[in-house]
Image (spheres, rainbow, N blue to C red):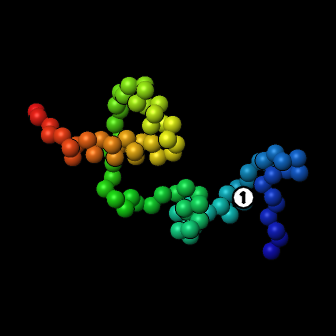
Amino acid sequence: MPRPAPLTKPDGEVREIKTEDLKRFRDAASLSAGLQRKLGVRGPQKSPTKERITIRLSRDVLERFRATGDGWQTRVDSALQDWLKKHKLTA
C-alpha cells in the first residue's frame, strides 16, 4: 500500500486536501482517552456543573483576582462561597 502524501508542501504550506485524505481522517471521539485529553477534548464533568452567567464586578476586584493567574474565576467562586458561609442572606 503506498504511503499517503504529506499534508504540507516542502515550503511548509498546507496542500489542498483531497477526498482520499478525508477518508483517512478519524473522528476525535475515536481516539484513546489519553490522546483526547492532550487534544483538549473534555469528558463529562466529575463535579456538579457550574452555570455560565454575566456579572459586573468592580475593576479593582477583577484586576486582583486576574493577577493571581489561571484559575482566577474558580477563586472568585470560592471567595463567594466562603462569604455565603459566614453571612446570612435576607430576602
Q: Is residue 84 left or right of residue 54?
A: left
Tell me which corner region of the image, top left, top right, bottom left or bottom right, holds residue 35: bottom right
Residue 56 image point, x, y percent: 35, 27
The front one of 58 and 29 is 58
* Quarter that holds the C terminus: top left
Q: Is residue 29 left or right of residue 14?
A: left
- The residue at the point 79 percent across, 64 percent down is 4
**Residue placed furthest toward the left:** 91
Q: Secondary structure at mark 1?
A: helix
Other residues around mark 1 within 10 Å, as few (<14) / some (14–19) / many (≥20): few
- The residue at the point 34 percent across, 46 percent down is 78
Q: Is residue 83 above or below residue 45?
A: above
Q: Is residue 19 visible?
A: yes
- The residue at the point 72 percent across, 60 percent down is 20
* Quarter that holds the N terminus: bottom right
**Residue placed furthest toward the front:** 86
Residue behind mark 1: 21
Q: Is residue 87 above or below residue 4?
A: above
Residue type at tag 1: Asp
Q: Is residue 27 visible?
A: no
Residue 52 image point, x, y percent: 35, 41
Please count the marks in the image. 1
The front one of 80 and 16 is 80
The front one of 82 and 9 is 82
Q: Is residue 42 left or right of residue 7?
A: left
Residue 65 image point, x, y percent: 44, 37
**Residue placed furthest toward the top:** 59
Tell me which corner region of the image, top left, top right, bottom left or bottom right, holds residue 5: bottom right
**Residue placed furthest toward the right:** 10
